[in-house]
Image (cartoon, rainbow, N blue to C red):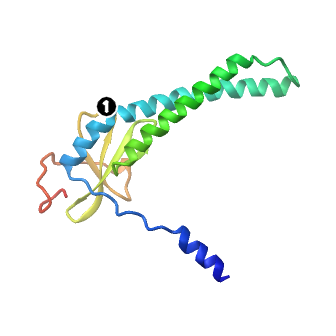
Amino acid sequence: MADEDDDQEQDETPEPPQRLFTLTEAERVRQELEPFLVEAMDCRKKLAGLENDLSAVSARIMMMGGVIVPYEKLAALRTEHNQLAETMKSALSRILETGCLIKDLDVGLLDFPAVIDNQDVYLCWKVGEDRIRFYHRQDEGFAGRKPLDQRDPGPGDKVQ
């Protein structure tokens, strides 16, 4: 029993403190990350199509009880699938290492942890918006977005 407790303690590494963004920092990071986010979104769409193609071949083989498999075509699909998956993984890692959060990859929604009026919030941005214009409390989500005053007052004022 004591050994199990020791194993659990070793597995539980403390999480690094969450990075907090000022509006200016979040906007700068957003501009840097937008190409990576668009790339990840594109890869995800292409991967969905490839997975459908691979599943269709697999289903056909199962239903027919065996068929001559177009090996070269399937190998090319599998290689493309693996390359897209690796590209998407790399783009997502690049985004997450900045401290921002990917909330919805389908629409390209990012949240940047911040503090407004001593409350933990997310500065919220999605692909297609020209800048960060909204925020929401951490328990509200996208539906609770509120307009953000675009000034960046600094650490002692409203948006920290």
Q: Where 95 sits versus 127, above or below?
A: below
Q: Secondary structure under badge 1? A: loop
User: In the image shown, does 73 or 143 lie closer to the viewer?
Assistant: 73
Residue visible at 16% across and 48% down? 149
Residue visible at 49% across and 30% down? 43
Q: Is residue 9 left or right of residue 155?
A: right
The N terminus, quarter of image: bottom right
Residue visible at 70% across and 17% down? 72
Residue extending furthest toward the right: 65
Kind of residue sitting beneath label 1: Gly
**What residue is pinned by disc 1?**
128
Q: Residue 27 location, x and y as percent?
A: 23, 42
- Toward which corner of the image does residue 20 lie, by quadrant? bottom left
Q: Where 96 sits versus 18, above or below?
A: above
Q: Where 71 sits versus 9, above or below?
A: above
Q: Residue 125 location, x and y as percent?
A: 31, 42
